[in-house]
Each structure stands twice: as structure tokens, then as C-alpha cells.
Image (cartoon, grey):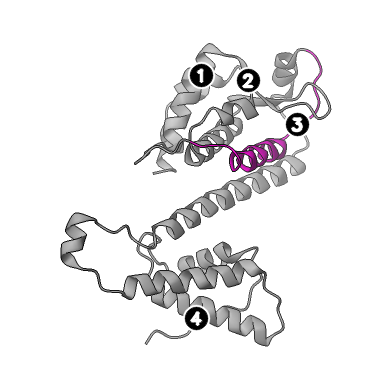
């Protein structure tokens, strides 16, 4: 039997963070999770937390029930003839999709934190004169964190309206980079909310959000806001075509999402 995992009883924001930590520490393939082992370790964490009077939210209990349900489905034998007529989807697929989505958001949050630390530590900006020249009329100060709030609001609203999920959708961040290149080849500025809401699925929204972050980091797109509580806008900067034309820029970004 595998040796027990040392959790150190770290505090997690939610059950998905705990599962990601278990998977990464043991270098498990996220697409082939050994559900029995992970379920046992997850329940051990909850038991130790209870013994130390650490209060866990109802989300942890619900995830424990979900893991046990997945484990029981995988233990049940399947009729080979029935599989030929109606192949059963891997019971772990929905959980894997949720874990991957959570990991993307964590990566984006870490990138934003690094950007903020860098900006707070910087005394000057060599290209500030260029940005002021491009700005035209004075605008309110707006940061990537404001864009994140806009994106979160769009995702929240999307729960209450129909989203057209496309079967076997293969949209990716590189696809969205090409989409933005084409879009801002015609337009110079657009509402971030409007751009996100044009997408047909949550996956497309997330990929588009990550693509926008990459272009903001490359100083190809800028964030705008014309007044207090006004919508966040996306604006093409002078370095837009240079970011796509520079050797290795887009190739490096696309490689990071393969």
C-alpha cells in the first residue's frame, strides 16, 4: 500500500484546490486520476481537520460525496455488449474539467499577482509617454484587476442565460489570439463585456480571457474606462501588430498553452 501523504493540514480556498494539491504533489496525470487513492487521501484530510477542530465548508462535504459516487461508478462492472451499443463516458471527466478550469484561473491569478508586484516595485515606465500620447482624452486609471471583475460578472450572468455548448469544441487560447488579431484588425476599441458575451460557451469565454491577458502583458491591448463605474474597454495599442509580427512572441505564448 502507498505510504500516507503528509498534508501539513494546509488551508485551502475550496475542495478543488485541495484535490489539485494532492494531484500535483504526487505528480499524478490529471486525465487519469486514481480515484480510489485520491478519495482515501481526501477523506483523511477531512478527518484530520475534524480532529483539529478546523471548520470545513459544505463544499468539502459535497466533494467527498462526489468522489465516493465516482469511485462506486468505476467499481461497478459494465456489460461489454451494452458498451458496444452505448459507450459510457468516463465518470471522472466532469471532475477533470472542473479541475482544469480551476487551474487556469489559479495560473491567471498568479500572473496578475506577479504583475502587480512588479508594477508596485517599478519607479518609472520607459513607455509612459507613448501611452499618454495614445490615450487622447484623460481616462480613469484602470488595471487588469478591473478586467478580472468584469469577466467574473460575465461568467456569473452566463449561469442565468442559455450558453450554446458545441459538441467536441476544440477552441483554445491560440485560437482566441488569432480571433483577437482579426477582430482588432477591423476595430480599434470594444467593450470587454460585449466581447466576452459574444462567445458561445464558458470554455470560449475562459480562453478569450486568457488571450486578452497575454496581449495586455505584451502591451498590444490597453484597458480603458471613460468614467466612474463605466464599462471596461479594450483598446488596440500601437504595439498591437508588432506583438503579432515579432519573431517568437506568439509562438512562445502558444507553446505555453499546448
User: Which quadrant would residue 235 be assigned to in this image?
Assistant: top right
Camera-side residue: 229 or 181?
A: 229
Is residue 103 found left or right of 89 in the rendered image? right
N-terminal of the pair, mark 3 or mark 1, is 3
Spatial separation of the CA atoms under disc 3 and disc 1: 22 Å
Residue where numbered disc 1 is placed: 183
Quadrant of the rendered image containing residue 70: bottom left
Q: Residue at x 71, y 46 (%)?
A: 117
**Label 4 sits on residue:** 5
Q: Earlier in the sequence, mark 4 or mark 2?
A: 4
User: Which is closer to the viewer, label 2 or label 3?
Assistant: 2
Q: Residue at x 61, y 79 (%)?
A: 8
> In which quadrant is the N terminus drawn?
bottom left
**Comes first in the chain, label 3 or label 4:** 4
Q: Is residue 86 above or below residue 145?
A: below
Mark 1 or 4: the one toward you:
1
Residue 218 counted in the magenta span: no
Relative to residue 136, is residue 207 depicted above or below? below
Q: Which residues are magenta?
A: 137-163
In the displayed structure image, the side of residue 76 where residue 156 appears, left or right: right
Quadrant housing residue 57? bottom right
Q: State the residue in front, 83 or 36.
A: 83
Q: Which residue is mark 3?
A: 142
As measured in the structure, the alpha-carbon distance from the residue carrying label 2 to the one carrying label 1 is 10 Å
Real-space CA distance between mark 1 and mark 4, rounded to the nearest whole angstrom: 49 Å
CA distance for labels 3 and 4: 44 Å
Q: Residues within 10 Å of mark 2 (few under 14, many from 20)?
A: some
- Which residue in the protein does label 2 denote? 190
Residue 157 in percent (x, y) is at 64, 39
Camera sees residue 246? no
Residue 84, how many percent across, how many down?
A: 17, 57
Amino acid at each position: 500500500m502507498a505510504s500516507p501523504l503528509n498534508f501539513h493540514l494546509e488551508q485551502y480556498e475550496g475542495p478543488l484546490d485541495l484535490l489539485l494539491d494532492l494531484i500535483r504533489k504526487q505528480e499524478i496525470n490529471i486525465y487519469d486520476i486514481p480515484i480510489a487513492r485520491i478519495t482515501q487521501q481526501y477523506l483523511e484530510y477531512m478527518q484530520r481537520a475534524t480532529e483539529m477542530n478546523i471548520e470545513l465548508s459544505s463544499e468539502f462535504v459535497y466533494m467527498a460525496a462526489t468522489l465516493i459516487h465516482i469511485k462506486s461508478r468505476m467499481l461497478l462492472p459494465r456489460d461489454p455488449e451494452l458498451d458496444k451499443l452505448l459507450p459510457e463516458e468516463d465518470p471522472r471527466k466532469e471532475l477533470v474539467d472542473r479541475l482544469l478550469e480551476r487551474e487556469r484561473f489559479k495560473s491567471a491569478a498568479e500572473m496578475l499577482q506577479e504583475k502587480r508586484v512588479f508594477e508596485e516595485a517599478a519607479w518609472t515606465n520607459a513607455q509612459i509617454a507613448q501611452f499618454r500620447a495614445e490615450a487622447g482624452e484623460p481616462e480613469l486609471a484602470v488595471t487588469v484587476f478591473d478586467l478580472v471583475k468584469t469577466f467574473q460578472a460575465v461568467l456569473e450572468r452566463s449561469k442565468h442565460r442559455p450558453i450554446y455548448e458545441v459538441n467536441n469544441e476544440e477552441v483554445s487560447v491560440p485560437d482566441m489570439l488569432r480571433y483577437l488579431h482579426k477582430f482588432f484588425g477591423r476595430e480599434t476599441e470594444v467593450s470587454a463585456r460585449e466581447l466576452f458575451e459574444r462567445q458561445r460557451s464558458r470554455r470560449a469565454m475562459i480562453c478569450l480571457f486568457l488571450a486578452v491577458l497575454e496581449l495586455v502583458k505584451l502591451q498590444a491591448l490597453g484597458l480603458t474606462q471613460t468614467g466612474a463605474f463605466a464599462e471596461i474597454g479594450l483598446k488596440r495599442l500601437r504595439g498591437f501588430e508588432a506583438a503579432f509580427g515579432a519573431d517568437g512572441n506568439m509562438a512562445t505564448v502558444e507553446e505555453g498553452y499546448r
